[in-house]
Amino acid sequence: MTSIGILGIGFPQSDVPVQSWIIEAYDRSLIPAPVYMLALGRYNSDNTDGSVLVIGGYDESLVQGDLNWISCSGDFHVQIPMDGVIVNDYTVVRQDGAPMQAIIDV
């Protein structure tokens, strides 16, 4: 499979003369809110269990239970707290117990 491009969703930068395209879309009333939902899944060739990006809100059919809003801890990248990573049913955490951060690069 080949990539068709990269879509960046990030914070506005003071040294960049234009604002984020998602903020621009909201300002122009093209989307109902300056938010997005990222649902990660496994790739499946029939696209029934893959990842999805929703711009301007969220897809209620992909949410079970209450929504959890996560405050970003970064001001350059979309960065969130991370407790650990699960790989093949094995949880990987820092041995020293120090907090970890994950960068969400869409």
Image: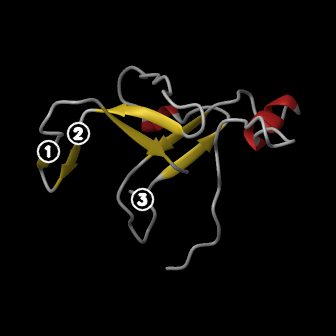
Q: Position of residue 13 (x, y in %)?
A: 73, 37
Residue kind at label 1, given as amino acid type: Thr
Q: Name the residue under label 3.
A: 48
Q: Which residue is drawn at 63% across and 62% down?
A: 6
Of residues 65 and 101, the one drawn nearer to the viewer in this rendering: 101
The reply to whether callout 1 and callout 3 are in contact (CB within 8 Å) is: no
Q: Residue at x 35, y 59 (%)?
A: 42
Q: Where is residue 75 in the image (x, y as percent from the top left)?
A: 59, 31
Q: How far apart are marks 2 and 1 (CA)?
A: 6 Å
**Quadrant of the image occupied by residue 48:** bottom left
Q: Which mark is residue 84?
A: 2
Give how far apart the Cα atoms at labels 3 and 2 are: 27 Å
SS under mark 3 = loop
Instruction: Name the foreground residue: 98 vs 37.
Output: 98
Taking the image as shown, residue 106 lies to the left or right of residue 46, namely: right
Count residues near mark 2 (Cα–Cα under 10 Å), then give few for <14, some for 14-19, many for 20+: some
Q: Name the residue under label 1.
A: 91
